[in-house]
Image (cartoon, coloured by chain):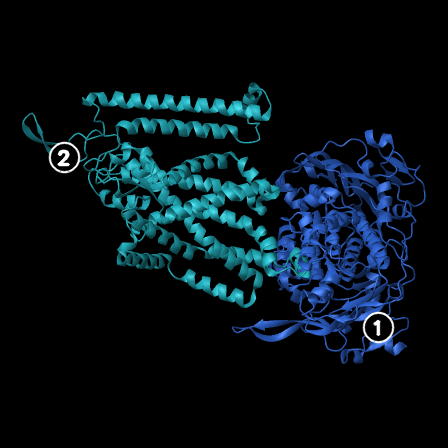
Chain colours: A blue, B cyan
Amino acid sequence: MSPLLRVDKLVTGIGAARVVDGVSFDVAAGETYALLGESGCGKSMTALSLMRLLPDGGRILSGHVQLGETDVLALPERDMRRVRGGRMAMVFQEPMLALNPVIKVGDQIGEALSLHQDLGGQAARDAARALLDSVGVPDAARRLDSYPFELSGGLRQRMMIAMALAGEPSLLIADEPTTALDVTIQAQVLDVLRNLRAKRRMGMLLITHDLGVVAENADRVGVMYAGELLEEGTRDAFFTAPQHPYSRMLFEALPRTGDAGRLTTIAGQVPRLDAHLRGCRFAPRCPFAIARCRVESPGWQELDGQRVRCHLAGSLPAGSVRERVAHPVAEHPPQPLLQVEGLKVFFPIRRGLIQRTVGHVRAVDDVDLTIQAGRTLALVGESGCGKTTVGKALLRLIEPTAGTIMLGGETITAKNAPALRRQAQMVFQDPFSSLNPRMRVVDTLLEGMDALGVGARGERRGAVARLLNQVGLPDDAGGRYPHAFSGGQRQRIAIARALAVSPRLVICDEPTSALDVSVQAQILNLLKDLQADLGLAYLFITHNLAVVEYLAHDVAVMYLGRIVEQGRAGAVLRTPRHPYTQALVSAVPRIEPHTGQTIVRLAGDQPSPLNPPVGCHFHPRCPHASAVCRQSYPARTDLGGGHWVRCHWVAAQD
Amino acid sequence: MSLVTSHFVPVLLWTDALIFMLLIVSLAAVWWIRRHAHLRAPWAAVARRPMAMGAALVLAVFVVIGLLDSLHYRERLDDSPPDRPQYSVEVLSVFDALAGRLRTQQEKTYSAPLAMHLYAKEFTERDGATVRDYPRLKYGGAHLKQADEYVPDIVRRILVGLLQGLAGSLLLFGLLAAWQARHERMRLGGWLSAWATGHLGWPGRTVVIVLTLMLILGAVMARLAAGYHVFGTDKVGQDVLYISLKSIRTGLVIGTLTTLVTLPLAIVLGIAAGYFRGWVDDVIQYVYTVLNSIPGVLLIAAAVLIVQVAIEAHPDLFDTAAARADVRLLALCVIMGVTSWTSLARLLRGESLKLRTLDYVEAARAFGVSHARIISRHIFPNVFHLVLIAIVLDFSGLVLAEAVLSYVGVGVDPAMYSWGNMINGARLELAREPVVWWQLGAAFVFMFTLVLAANLFADGVRDAFDPRLEERR
């Protein structure tokens, strides 16, 4: 049977760079083909080349793209417009940007319907409703009249999928369709895509950097690196025995449960594609590279159903390349460093001419936390649950509405804030917005020391050199500006800045979520090393449970401004008790096949913290909700070993 | 007292002081920028743009004339006693001294560009009879004995000017090539071929061509001006070329000093509103909303009238007419600055609102860095490109605004040389038959050149500094 889509030696250039270089693959009807790779590897450019939607300056230089019987690259633009959206459709990463904010979603879907199916008026409306039903949008008839801003991220992405389906395409290209979404929503959207593919026998090209998403959704996998495909195979073969060193290292770089070892990092960066590349493109970063790798580009080799481009394919050591050096586990006597009681952060909502306060957004509502010296507490939750607000309120970057914060036995008030600032610092999520582009690295690092008067003036320069060394940056980094560094290096600078005042607590606000897997591994290793060397305590704010398992000692799960479950990391993540934690844990796409655990899928979205549901905040989405849940907020149920949960259902079980 | 100083006494008008202060600040800024790589980079991008560099050269000529015209002095009266020297009430500038006869060769009334005769008929005695005819000019073409020598003389002057300009530019080009080749350590031939093919790294061809054109134009004008009134004369017989050149200073003063008033207001209030928000933001917003709602011309007219009344009430404070006109010019700059800071302030407020939420500002706050330091180290350097773009874009607008205001009659002092006054003076004569067009024409040509050059340069600056246009580079 001939495949639905056949891509043959596709070469795409932007300026002098060959961003896609000789990529060939097939997608059959009803099959999901995943393109996997880190950012800047040419995955999205491949997809845009297929749609012929390249950005300015981009050109397809050679190759063939065959969709069914049609040669896509040979079509005139007029006919191509019917193919786009009609026979192959695309779902983009950012549903916020892909929908027009001033047109109702029903009309936007209707536009696609009228273009590709010649439907109009009531017929189009009915068809749009059917589409929304098929992508699992609740209350579809009403949603047709919504504007995009009235919808949550998950619903918007479903609208995008519905719009893509309007032309009844035979091939759906999904470019990181869930990267911008929370895990529970990601699980919902991926379910929708899986069901649709099965029902409509569509071919699907799934572009992602997330091995977990690939493992749960793809039939076949292609690994891209620096514009080339390196490895291709069925999912099962690929996940049992990845053949290319790059694929292997991607696996090794993933933090996994119960793993105290260092993560494998991939040294260096993806090479610049506008340079003349010789030999295997991965050779400069490959620990196995031999002389031949540097001069001769490897061809495809077949290995029991898998295809791989590596000179050493089949002869690589079968085992793991991961160093089995355990982190020295510094056992500190449990001594509370930071104690937070009854922390509340309310944002007033003001209306009218005189800005009268008409209500409050309860971003953080009665949170208690204890962080032990030298240990890591992870604060987990979906976006919008208030976890970042907790971090900022602890540092008094946002003034808390109520609650006491005790640091090292001393109560922190607005008056002794400098004492707090010397002991607690923050590392931010986005390394691109957290460094001032107009300040040299050395000035950035000196800023905190100058402001808090740390060390003698003359010694600060020496301290900067020591800091740079500590976070693994070259000595001359201080004289340069942030734009000269990659994302991972910038995050190292941000960590060095926080360490400059020798704090005892570092609040890490999703420090790795903007980074690629291999770079994330470097940063996680660094954080662990620093904790071992300096005895730092971390408050690690994240939505990535895999990172939590790897790094954290304790976990607090937050939902809508409140902590619903807290305890030792192992206990909470392996035997979650709160229905929300259970849903969160089971929504994470995993590489390993699911072991016995029932899969809990949450319906709906997180409600607005403006007027949270009465009773237990979680009850509208909870599969175990009962009458009592709708009336009163549950009290703490202690499960022993410091593990507690706030849930009527669990309380009733015990 | 030495002989030289006793011949004249330097006069420092208010605007002169401010202009030279501005010059010093600009030079300091250049020195500062040269030392910082991230500041230097966008200027290097400006320097690589042929259009911007050509415009910058034209601007430089205007600026040099303006600066020369800002070095004022008063001459000693010839008949004043040596022990108690008395000085002329007329304030002259170095430019006047260089212009020489251009200033003093005054005709009776209008004469057309390059004319030998007056533009009005008069009764003159010829061969004992009184005839009504166009009389010969006192200075324009006075060296010609016969009318038929006129065309050959003009052609000869143009050709000589052309040759002089060409020779001058060739000499300059040779010097440039020799210096550059030495500087870059390459052979002269190599540099020349790199220049010809445009592989210099800076727009060498454009710079040389613009310089050559300007030199030729300058030489031809100088040749012609030596014997004729190139742009004719105005109602009282003054050389229009001279008036136009003198007006350059007025235009530049309005364009730059107004910005000097605008900037502190816009930067301080704009950033404060965006950074502090809350009631500070409310107050500042109310202020600029109110200011914006008053018709600008009305406010300017009122302010200028007040200043004029004040000047007339205190004649003892101003010893010369030039000083009075100068204060009025300064007042105009101030009042235009006060009314025009709002748009930049609004822009800076928006940008600061965005910047204050960025993580690096939060990080600074987590260190307890003071507001003043956050603003000076984090906010201001990141909005500076907006300030710069606003300065260069506003400049041309202000030069044009001066012309409009002077035309309406609320601009600079009527005795002051300015393009606006030239247009105002030419207004009535446009209805005359035959029409007197050269005053308007000259003002138009000069203003157009200055504003076009400023706009082209501003375009280059904006392209280099605006981060949103970065991907196009």
Q: Is residue A383 left or right of residue B121?
A: right
Residue type highlighted by circle 1: Val
Vertical side of A284 occupied by A439: above or below: below
Badge 2 is on which residue?
B121
Vertical side of A231 occupied by B211: above or below: above
> For residue A359, what is the image quadrant?
bottom right
Residue A410: tell me if it is visible.
yes
Q: Chain of mark 2?
A: B
Q: Nearer the viewer, residue B460 or B42?
A: B42
Badge 1 is on which residue?
A645
Position in image of residue A177 (x %, y %): 73, 53
* Callout 1 secondary element: strand
Position in image of residue A247 (x %, y %): 85, 44
Q: Nearer the viewer, residue B464 or B77?
A: B77
- Counting other residues with Cα less than 10 Å from the Cα at mark 2, is it few (<14), some (14-19), or many (20 or more)? few
Q: Is residue B430 left or right of residue A88?
A: left
